[in-house]
């Protein structure tokens, strides 16, 4: 759920924005920070971010998500790279969580491999071999072929 058009905010939106003007990143609660990270990483789905972070039902999640979009939208405006940072942090945390709770060693190794890739711990090596080829003419190929036939006989 996204806030209505900012050119024509409702009285509720105006009141929430006014109350949240004093908020700084350090004054946000842990849940607000987690909600913001989840909101950015899930494609700006406020309700699902609230369901993920807060222990609430769907109706409350819709309300929390709506209110948080109003309160916290300015944090996205302050730092345009925030979505990239949050997404990388979220992915890393999610992969680590998967690695820790994986039931099989195969799943753990795969999660750890992905975690290593996010940290650029592995580099793909490309082997470049240069093969020198002599100029092959019909005569040289015929001669080589005849030598091979003699060696077989």
Image (cartoon, grey):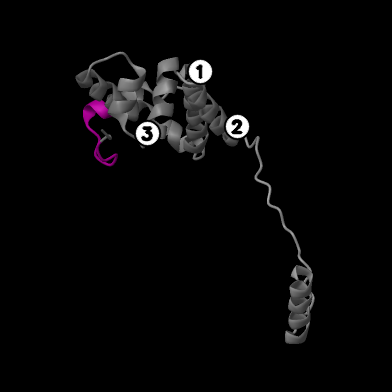
Mark toward the viewer: 3 or 2: 2
Examine the image and state in which quarter residue 1 appears: top left
The answer to which of 126 and 56 lies nearer the viewer is: 126
Q: CA distance from mark 3 to mark 2?
A: 22 Å
Question: Circle 2 sits on which residue?
Answer: 116
Which circle marks residue 42 in the picture?
3
Which circle marks residue 20 in the picture?
none
Examine the image and state in which quarter residue 116 appears: top right
What is the number of callouts on the image? 3
Q: Is residue 78 above or below residue 52?
A: below
Image x and y of residue 120, in percent: 63, 37
Q: Which residues are magenta?
A: 4-13
Image x and y of residue 66, in percent: 27, 27
Question: Circle 1 sits on which residue?
Answer: 100
Which structural element holds mark 3?
loop
The answer to which of 22 and 58 lies nearer the viewer is: 58
Query: Could you tell me if the residues under marks 1 and 3 are in contact, i.e. CB atoms within 8 Å?
Result: no
**Residue 137 relative to residue 57: left or right:** right
Q: Is residue 39 magenta?
A: no
Q: Is residue 11 magenta?
A: yes
- Residue at 33% over, 29% down: 69
């Amino acid at each position: 759920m996204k806030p209505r058009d900012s050119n024509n905010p409702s009285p509720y939106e105006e009141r929430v924005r006014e109350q949240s003007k004093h908020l700084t990143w350090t004054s946000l609660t842990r849940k607000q920070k987690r909600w913001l990270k989840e909101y950015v990483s899930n494609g700006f789905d406020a309700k699902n971010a609230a369901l993920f972070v807060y222990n609430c039902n769907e109706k409350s999640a819709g309300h929390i998500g709506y209110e948080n979009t109003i309160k916290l939208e300015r944090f996205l405006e302050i730092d345009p790279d925030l979505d990239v940072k949050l997404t990388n942090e979220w992915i890393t945390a999610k992969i680590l969580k998967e690695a820790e709770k994986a039931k099989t060693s195969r799943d753990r190794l795969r999660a750890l491999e992905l975690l290593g890739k996010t940290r650029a711990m592995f580099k793909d090596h490309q082997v470049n071999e240069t093969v020198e080829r002599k100029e092959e003419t019909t005569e040289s190929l015929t001669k080589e072929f005849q030598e091979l036939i003699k060696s077989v006989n």
